[in-house]
Amino acid sequence: MKTFFLIVLSWVGLMSAQAQNKDWNQLLNDYLKLEDALVASNPDEAKEAIAKMQKEVKQLQPDAAGKAHQKELKFLTAYLEVAGKATSLEDIRTRFEKISGSMIALAEQKVFGAEALYVMYCPMKKTSWLDDTKDVKNPYYGKAMLTCGSVKKTIN
């Protein structure tokens, strides 16, 4: 009976961890959609991605209580709120810098289930963003400077 109980507890713990990973991965996916929208200079898709990220962060906050990434989620919540009120593509791009900083910090804390993430750097803007490929597609300038940037760091 003890063995059965331990198996059930292990299974519940595994399922809980998988569910939490799914939520973190959804946040990352929504961030990557935001990045793609900025690369494509599409403010409507960018605002939609921001709204989805806000929902994901709200769902993750209770699970993050007492953990190192709780602080970063609070920052991200504030940055997303400001970005959600942006009235232009340029305003969203400006807010993307802070959002990216929080997402990079979370990636460094290994909350995402991705095999590898890349910290990209834009020398013109002097700021970074997170990507899941090594291909440079600059969200800060879109088509105007699409390939401006480089891989600064790999997070495994």
Image (spheres, rainbow, N blue to C red):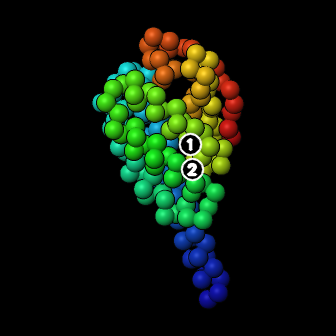
Q: What mark, if any, has residue 112 been given in the picture?
A: none
Regarding mark 1 in the picture, which secondary structure is present there?
helix
Residue sitting farthest toward the top: 144
Asked if residue 17 can be seen in this view, the reply is: yes
Looking at the picture, which amino acid does disc 2 mark? Glu
SS at badge 2: helix
* Mark 2: few/some/many CA within 10 Å (<14, 14-19, 20+): some
Question: Where is residue 136 shown, x and y percent of the image?
Answer: 56, 20
Residue 131 shows in this picture: no
Residue 34 shown left or right of residue 15 in the figure = left
Q: Is residue 93 above or below residue 52?
A: above
As drawn, 21 above or below 12: above
Residue 1 in picture, x, y percent from top left:
61, 89
The residue shown at (50%, 42%) is: 28
Residue 133, x across and y down, in percent: 58, 28
Q: Residue furthest bottom?
A: 1
Residue at (58% x, 69% y) in the render: 13
Mark 1, other Cα within 10 Å: few <14 / some 14–19 / many ≥20: many
Whichever of callouts 2 and 1 sits on the residue coming sooner in the sequence is 2
The reply to whether discs 2 and 1 touch (Cβ–Cβ < 8 Å) is yes
Taking depth in this image into account, of 86 and 107 the one nearest to the observer is 86
* Quadrant (top left/top right/bottom left/bottom right) for the C terminus: top right
Task: Find disc 2 in the rendering and name its residue.
Answer: 72
Identify the residue at image location x=54%, y=71%.
Answer: 12
Which amino acid lies under the numbered mark 1 shown in the image of this protein?
Ser
Spot occupied by residue 88 in the image (x, y as percentages of width and height): 33, 26
Disc number at residue 102? 1
Which of these two is toward me, 102 or 13? 102
